[in-house]
Image (spheres, helix red, strand yellow):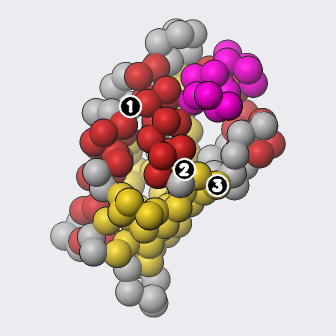
Amino acid sequence: MANNSSGYQIYEALLKAFGVGAEAVTTLFNDDAIIEFPYAPSIGAAGKQNMEAYRNHLEGGLKNMPNLKFSDIRVYPLQEEGTYWAEAHGETTILSTGILYQQDYIMYFILKDDKFSFYREYSNPLPALKAFGGTQATLDMFNVNK
């Protein structure tokens, strides 16, 4: 997808915001947005979050993921206006473990008024569990059940 499209620009802004913090990320979402992590239930986390839960998730996780960088960014517009599939590779060293975390993400999202109204993130939980120090450490890092 061309880098000058609004979908690409908003997605790229989101990826950069992950490296800044929870507040930077959540300003890119509508207040009533729904966020889904389809594989999260496999480790005991919620697969669907509202903005309050997502903000809590980000506040816990992002502070332990400094300098989170993304590459190989691709965005694919769908026929329905404001609807996209996207891919990115992310990596950072996890502060609490010192382990390099590398992940290939696939995202499906819907934009409304140039903000995310729906966001679904597919990622392999195994690299996360390894880098974050196991299941309980991962749940604790992302403020699950807090």
> Which disc number belongs to residue 48?
3
**Percent x, y of residue 20:** 28, 33
Q: Residue furthest bottom?
A: 79
- Between residue 82 and residue 44, name the one nearer to us: 44
Residue at 62 percent across and 28 percent down: it is 146
110 shown above or below 52: below
Q: Which residues are magenta?
A: 133-146
Relative to 37, 87 lies left or right? left
Q: Which residue is mark 1?
A: 68
Q: Earlier in the sequence, mark 2 or mark 1?
A: 1
> What residue lies at 38% left-to-right and 60% top-to-bottom?
31
Residue holding disc 2:
105
Q: Determine the CA span between mark 1 and mark 3.
A: 23 Å
- 123 relative to 101, above or below: below
Task: Give neighbour class at mark 2: few <14, some 14-19, many 20+ (Cα, 10 Å).
Answer: some
Return the x and y of residue 46 as percentages of the image width and height.
69, 46
CA distance separating discs 2 and 3: 17 Å
Indicate the amino acid at tag 3: Lys
How far apart marks 2 and 1 lie (CA) works out to 13 Å
Residue 105 located left or right of residue 2: right
Q: What x and y, as percent, mark residue 109?
A: 47, 67
146, 97: nearer the viewer: 146
Disc 2, disc 1: CB below 8 Å?
no
**Dot 2 amino acid type:** Tyr
Q: Quadrant of the N terminus?
A: bottom left
**Disc 1 to disc 3: CB gap under 8 Å:** no
